[in-house]
Amino acid sequence: MKENRGKIVKASHTGFCFGVRRAVGSAEKFLKKHKRAYSLGPIIHNPSVVNDLSSRGLEVISDIKRAKGSCLIIRSHGISPRLKENAHELSIDMLDATCPFVKRSHTIVTRLKKENYKIIIIGEKNHPEVKALLEVAGSGALVATRETDLKRLSFKNNKIAVVAQTTLSRDRFFRIVESILQLNCLEYRIFDTICNDVVQRQTEAKRLAKRVDLVFVVGGKISANTRHLAQICREQGAKTYHIETAKELRPSWIKPQSLVGVVSGASTPADIVEKVVTKLKKII
């Protein structure tokens, strides 16, 4: 039996994930009290939230020296030990808003490094979480974004340990792990460090995209987990639009009596999702 047309289906997992909610809440409390602070890169990957925090006194910087003698709010993606040392040398007070799942990855990698494993981080090379984790892992570690990144490498007789960017697509993680397991190694240790909330959103997005005519994926354009959700929806055959706010939504994209799905990235505020839903209701 076909579902009624002209309907909006919103994913149950929308709005901030725990780690983002914690980071934003910590920043808001700090700024309410102290009025000013810095973050090394955007605290989360959502322009609307970053702009709001900027209006409250949080300045995004690219050079840690800019925060000398002041306070640095460590972004949800975490920072490397080297940068923490630099901050201490510059007399910078740090408020740690690192996602607990990212901290867990740092702890795992630190232990694996001490146990002399060759560490492979599956993720996006330029993502701030991966860059910080790579520094934790040390010079012998490497990042694999796709299966082909492994072809030029030789791991014969090595002990290999694998971790993942917390916002990675689980399907991609499994594909690359399968390739790693075909290498000639003595020992493998695989750690699925993808955030549980991210996995739930990916699973729901996959199911939803199979049911609807088109999907709106709401979240920052530079947000890795949001881009992965859009990719997952497209892979199910659903027409997919990745938008940051309701302002980007165009009525011409929606045919009459369409069944429309709405999903959101982990760094997308609930009110932005609701504004998208409200605008869709006026169109359908």
Image (cartoon, rainbow, N blue to C red):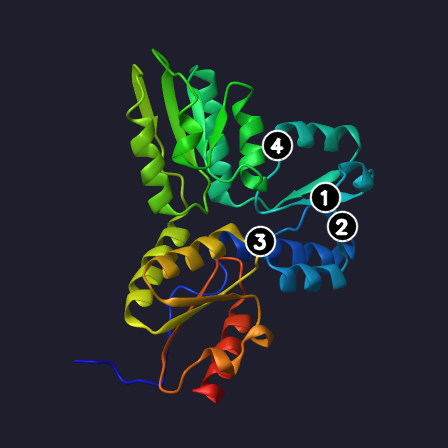
Mark 2 and mark 1 lie on one chain; the one further toward the N terminus is 2
What is the crowding at mark 1: few (fewer than 14 residues within 10 Å), some, or many (at least 20)?
Answer: many
Mark 4 and mark 1 lie on one chain; the one further toward the N terminus is 1
Q: Determine whether the residue tagged by mark 2 lies in a helix, strand or loop.
A: strand
Could you tell me if the residues under marks 1 and 3 are in contact, i.e. CB atoms within 8 Å?
no
Image position of 215 (left or right of 59): left
Residue wearing tag 2: 37
Mark 2 and mark 4 lie on one chain; the one further toward the N terminus is 2
**Mark toward the viewer: 1 or 3:** 3
Q: Determine whether the residue tagged by mark 1 lies in a helix, strand or loop.
A: strand
Q: Which mark is residue 80?
A: 4
Image position of 29 (left or right of 233): right
Residue type, label 3: Ile
Residue wearing tag 1: 72
Q: Quadrant of residue 210?
A: bottom left
Could you tell me if the residues under marks 2 and 1 are in contact, i.e. CB atoms within 8 Å?
yes
Between 28 and 45, the one lying in front of the other is: 45
Task: Point out residue 133 in the picture as x, y percentages from the top left corner.
Answer: 54, 32
